[in-house]
Image (cartoon, grey):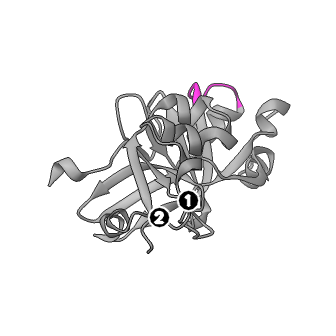
Amino acid sequence: METSRLNNHFLIAMPSLEDGNFSQSVTYICEHDDNGALGITINRPSEIILASIFEQLDIQCNNPEIQQQHVFIGGPVVQDRGFILHSPTGHWDSSIKITDEIALSTSKDILEAIAHKEGPDHTLITLGYAGWAPGQLEYELSQNAWLSCPATLDIIFNTPVELRWEKAAKSIGIDLQLLSQDMGHA
């Protein structure tokens, strides 16, 4: 049923979700279909900086500002593989166009362009992604583990990392601080 698809939506972890990978997280859903779902968590910076990624891939970058950018933990699946959420979509190798404004790429050519200040205007670089088997995300939603809402580029790329969880919820009128940790339990 196409109306239940959550492509280009945020999954906002409910305060009661205590899974270490997703507690207080906001995950951008890139794909959601009968095969499951794939998303990128947008508010989990890692200790890794781009300079070390560039070094591993033998990419030259002489811009300290770019080199010092933090790589995010995109989710618990294949954390040794890089994913770049970006806008505008552009024409990069190995890209999935999610909307007319945003794409997910996994190729070295986009990283080389970023290193040389020729990449997309907005990027969020992660290691790993969040994945759900067929029916798993629907089940978790039915168990009130997540809120969902339409995604915005502003929250992904312009909102300070520490404010993304609350701002995503507030975009649909929900103040997470007012929700009980024990919601749904008698």
Q: In this image, 33 relative to 70: left or right?
A: left
Q: Establish if 51 lies above or below 33.
A: above
* In-front residue for pair 96/29: 29
Q: Is residue 148 magenta?
A: no
> What kind of residue is marked 1?
Pro
Give whichever of 102, 142 is nearer the camera: 142
Give the prevailing secondary structure in the magenta stretch. loop
Q: Which residue is rendered at x = 41% and y = 58% of the image?
A: 38
Residue carrying label 2? 183
Name which residue lies at 39% across and 49% down: 148
Whole-angstrom CA distance, mark 1 to mark 2, is: 9 Å
Marks 1 and 2 close (CB-CB < 8 Å): yes
Q: Residues within 10 Å of mark 1 (few under 14, many from 20)?
A: some
Above/below status of 71 relative to 64: below
Horizontal and vertical percent position of residue 73: 64, 56
List x then y, in percent, for residue 44. Answer: 66, 52
Q: Is residue 99 above or below residue 179?
A: above
Residue 56 position within the rendered picture, expressed as x and y whole percent measured from the top left: 75, 55
Residue 41 in view here: no
Residue 136 vs 179, above or below: the answer is: below
Q: Quadrant of residue 61?
A: top right
Residue 121 left/right relative to 33: right
> Which residue is tagged 1?
15
What's the magenta region?
116-122
Helix, strand or loop status at disc 1: loop
